[in-house]
Amino acid sequence: MKITENDIHDHLRKRMVQRGVSLEEMQITLEKGWPALDAKKGTEGKIYVLPFNREWEGRYFEEKEVTVYYKFKAGELVLLTVKARYGKDFKRGGVS
């Protein structure tokens, strides 16, 4: 699933800025992530843990867990929202 700036609607862009997630991190999550078990019915999600090793909002974090929620409408990918958690030693492989 290749995403571009055109796939980013206003709500999603606000969440990306608010939560510190880049388009590149979302793309990596969609490509390499595992299924988000908390996705609501009719939606899908992918989770991926990325190395971070820098500060976010004044605190240092080793990792960032990114979750991207989306659905397919008429065969087209529709990005819904994105979440981020900062920390270390996140579980991988479908358990967050």
Image (cartoon, rainbow, N blue to C red):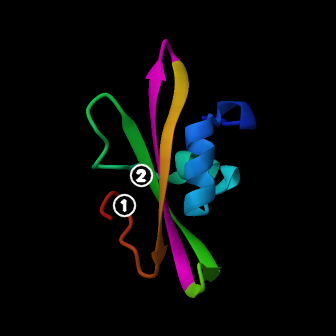
Task: Find numbered disc 2 in the image and state the secondary structure of the residue it sits on.
Answer: strand
**Above or below 26: residue 52:** below
Please, what is the three-letter code of the amino acid marked with disc 1?
A: Gly
Q: Which mark is residue 46?
A: none
Q: Which residue is mark 2?
A: 34
Task: Answer whether residue 71 is magenta in the image.
Answer: yes
* Residue visible at 40% across and 74% down in the picture: 90
Position above or below: 89 against 71: below
Real-space CA distance between mark 2 and mark 1, rounded to the nearest whole angstrom: 6 Å
**Where's residue 68, x and y in %?**
48, 47
Residue 12 % position (x, y): 57, 42
Task: Provide residue 36's location: percent of width, then percent of height.
Answer: 35, 49
Instruction: Compare residues 28 and 81 and report the one nearer the observer.
Output: 81
Start and end of the magenta stretch?
Answer: 61-75
Q: Toward the viewer: 5 or 12?
A: 12
Mark 2, other Cα within 10 Å: few <14 / some 14–19 / many ≥20: some
Amino acid at pointer 2: Trp
As drawn, the residue found furthest toward the right would be: 5
Rendered residue at 28%/49% (across/down): 37
* Position of residue 4 in the picture relative to residue 41 (left or right): right
Quadrant including the N terminus: top right
State which quarter of the image contains the C terminus. Answer: bottom left
> In this view of the protein, which residue sits in the foreground, 4 or 11?
11
Q: Residue 16: x percent and y percent?
A: 60, 53
First-in-chain label (2 vs 1)? 2
Label 2–label 1 contact, CB within 8 A: yes
Residue 53 higher or lower than 92, as above or below: below
Residue 4 belongs to magenta span? no
| Residue at image coords 61%, 76% | 52
Residue 93's disc number: 1
Question: Quick one: label 1, few (<14), some, or many (20+) residues within 10 Å?
Answer: few
